[in-house]
Amino acid sequence: MGTYPTPLEPAPRLAAALGLDQLWIKRDDLIGLGGGGNKVRKLEYTLAAARAHRADLVVTSGAAQSNHARLTAAGAARLGLRAVLVLEGHEPPAVTGNLLLNRLFGAEIIWAGEVRPAELGTRVAAEAERRRAGGERVEVIPFGGSSVLGARGYEEAGAELLRQIPDLDTVVVALGSGGTMAGLVNALGADRVLGVDVGAVDDPGAAVLGLVRGSPSLRIRRATSEYGRLTTEVRQALQLVARTEGVVLDPVYTGRAAAGLIAAVEDGSIRPDERTVLLHTGGLPGLFGHPENSGIYA
Ligand SMILES: *Cc1c(COP(=O)(O)O)cnc(C)c1O
């Protein structure tokens, strides 16, 4: 469904601003389906499984501005499947960002109210059961697309990255449901992957370890604020990357990854001579999904 390999772009002005000799941005935001982003690589596998199981409907879940839900809707449209999205919260008055795209892709949305992510899984299972009882063939796509199968998409991305930069030292990635980091760890080894937790799950280390081979020691920077909160560090990271490279990050994931990269260089956990890659995992619609933030990027 996507277009590969995605570009690996040098980021010399950002590198200079951070004090790194060499830095690249891996543009998985340019994957090409439904606005792009990391979830497409996982959906290549999970939606292929849905097709193999002859499903006609896929059900998944996420936060209100979930990129995974949006890309599941896009991938389902591409494959001629229907999509049901169980989203956290209540229907907001304005249809913005990913919600607007979900509608455009023709997905059906069920608002789950204020629930914990684990309860979202229960709601998805119940909805799938209800539809099956009605005679539909249903495939459940896991939260964030993060299963052992979905993570294979990022194992493949890691191999793709090594063909582009064989002597890579460190790739920095936003860590949400864990499948992206897990696939990269399987391809590159745990030493070369720095995960920046965004606060999407209670135990991000366990989420990643559940999807990798063996039990490697992971490099993770824990979230310092709640999921989706736009901190000063994240806002400054968005501004810096935009103003040095003309590249747009998002406030929930890639902005945090960039803020984590900046902090890691500052505290020495990434050395200036490391050949470093910032993985751009997408998320642009999220920038337009939080109108309350719109005034503060100037
Ligand atoms: C989901 C997401 C991530 C995190 O990926 P996981 O595999 O869930 O850890 C990073 N960036 C963006 C833009 C995302 O939508």
Image: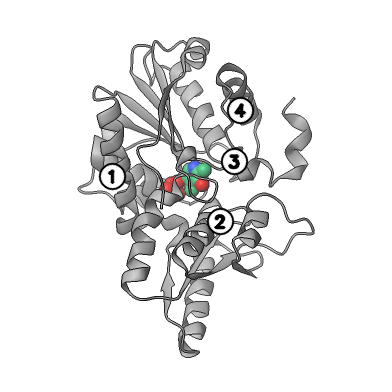
> What residue did someone put label 2 on?
70
Question: Residue 232 appears at what percent x and percent y?
Answer: 66, 28
Give the amino acid at mark 2.
Arg
State whether residue 21 is above or below residue 146. Answer: above
Alpha carbons under labels 2 and 3: distance apart: 12 Å
Label pair 3/1, CB-CB below 8 angstroms: no
> What residue did someone put label 4 on?
238
Q: Is residue 95 visible?
A: yes
Mark whose residue sits in front, 4 or 2 = 2
Q: Residue, x 49% and y 22% (percent of image)?
A: 263
State whether residue 255 is above or below residue 283. Answer: above
Alpha carbons under labels 3 and 1: distance apart: 23 Å
Of callouts 4 and 3, which one flags the residue occurring earlier in the amino acid sequence?
4
Label pair 1/2, CB-CB below 8 angstroms: no
Quadrant of the image occupied by residue 220: top left
> What residue did someone put label 3 on?
284
Depth check, front residue: 17 or 265: 17
> What residue did someone put label 1 on?
155
Other-residue count near label 1 (Cα within 10 Å), few / some / many at <14 / 14–19 / ≥20 = many
* Left or right placement of residue 105 versus residue 93 in this view: left
